[in-house]
Each structure stands twice: as C-alpha cells, then as structure tokens.
Image (cartoon, rainbow, N blue to C red):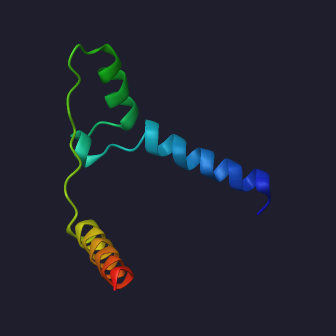
Amino acid sequence: HTYEEAAEIIYRTYEYYIYRYPQKRFHGKTANQVRQEALTAVTPEQYPIAPSRRIERFWEGIEKSKAKHQAQAQQ
C-alpha cells in the first residue's frame, strides 16, 4: 500500500467508528451522537468506562516491578 492508501484507510476507519458504529457503552448511540448531545446539554450524560481486570492486572504488575526496582536501588 502507498502512504495515500494507508491514510485513506485510516480516515475511513475513523469515520466509521465516530459516525456509524453504535457502541454498547453509549447505549446504542454513535460517538458523534453522544458528542452532539453533550455539546447541547447543560449536564451531559456520563458514560463511564467499565473496569477491565486485564488492565488492572497489568498496572498491578507495573507497580510490583517498580517496588522491586526501588528496593534493589536502596540496597
């Protein structure tokens, strides 16, 4: 693929995600619909991101690694 083709594919993917892809976390609305509602609302509806145990374990591992390195540096 050329640079132009890659750029076009990325743009089309972005456009689909923002304007056409209804998301479960937005209760079936697209990201653009949620954004437009938020821009006109006095108090925009909140759509919290559900916790991911995989990501939580990742960060726990990072913290353990940092603590281990700090303990080694103090010795």
User: Residue 60: horizontal and vertical position, in percent?
Assistant: 24, 72
Which residue: 64% across, 52% down? 9
Q: Which residue is nearer to you in this view: 33 or 40?
A: 40
Q: Where is the C terminus found, in terms of image quarters?
A: bottom left
User: Residue 16: horizontal and vertical position, in percent?
Assistant: 49, 44
Residue 40 placement, left or right of 50: right
Q: Is residue 4 above or below residue 46?
A: below
- Residue 2 is drawn in which quadrant? bottom right
Q: Where is the N terminus found, in terms of image quarters?
A: bottom right
Q: Is residue 71 above or below residue 17?
A: below
User: How many badges with numbers are in the image?
Assistant: 0
- Residue 68 is drawn in which quadrant? bottom left
Residue lying farthest front? Answer: 75
Which residue: 38% across, 81% down? 73
Residue 43 placement, left or right of 34: left
Q: Is residue 1 above or below residue 36?
A: below
Which residue: 29% across, 76% down? 67
- Residue 31 is drawn in which quadrant? top left
User: Residue 24: horizontal and vertical position, in percent?
Assistant: 24, 48
Q: Which residue is nearer to you in this view: 39 or 8?
A: 39
Q: Which residue is nearer to you in this view: 67 or 24?
A: 67
Residue 56 placement, left or right of 75: left
